[in-house]
Amino acid sequence: MKSFTASSQQLKPDSKYNNKLVAKFINCLMLDGKKSTAQRVFYDAMNIIGEKIKDSEPLEVFEKAINNAKPLIEVRSKRVGGASYQVPMQVNAKRQQSLAFRWILASSRGKKGKPMCQRLAAELIDAYNEQGGAMTTRDNIHKMADANKAYAHFAW
């Protein structure tokens, strides 16, 4: 008997851009199983990005924004002899991507007063330009790791 897990099933690329990264982002954007709503929000955001940034393709802006938001290093708690230390560690590729998605979505959901497609487009453009909430979160993580590099020898 073969067991199926979520990771063993292949993710199909999205219909408009034929890109697996876009499909994964749409799945992360989705709330309450409403995929068509998430797709509409994402594609509307891409249209807004296309209007605002004339010199680049919206898909290139999206991919560069995700790459800019990816953390290279993070801190993890490690108990040594009754004391907890914040130990800086490298982040693997899957976790980098999921953290970048999470921070971009959290930052765009945190803004109020505009439709989600406009907030998402603004956050993606900010991440593309290495600004905005997701980049602030990434920079704070990197600063924390840099401040605790004295405990790097505790890494496991």
Image (cartoon, rainbow, N blue to C red):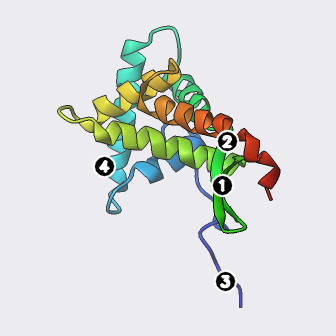
Per the model, the C-alpha gap separating discs 2 and 1 is 8 Å
Residue 90, given in percent of the width and then of the height, sits at 73, 45
Q: Which three-letter amino acid code belongs to the residue tagged 1?
A: Tyr
Q: Is residue 11 above or below residue 20?
A: below
- Identify the residue at horizontal 17%, vertical 33% (top origin): 113
Separation of disc 4 and disc 1 at Cα?
Answer: 43 Å
Q: Which type of secondary structure does the marked residue at label 1 adopt?
A: strand
Tell me the amino acid under the disc marked 2: Asn
Mark 1–mark 3 distance (CA, rounded to whole Å): 39 Å
Q: Quadrant of the C terminus?
A: bottom right
- The answer for how far apart the CA atoms under marks 2 and 4 are is 42 Å
- Callout count: 4
Pointer 4 residue: 37
Residue under label 2:
148
> In the rendering, which numbered label is found on residue 3?
3
Looking at marks 4 and 1 on the same chain, the residue that comes earlier in the sequence is marked by 4
Name the foreground residue: 11 vs 117.
117
Could one spot residue 13 in this view of the protein? no
Task: Say if residue 130 shows up in the picture.
Answer: yes
Return the residue found at the far bottom. Answer: 1
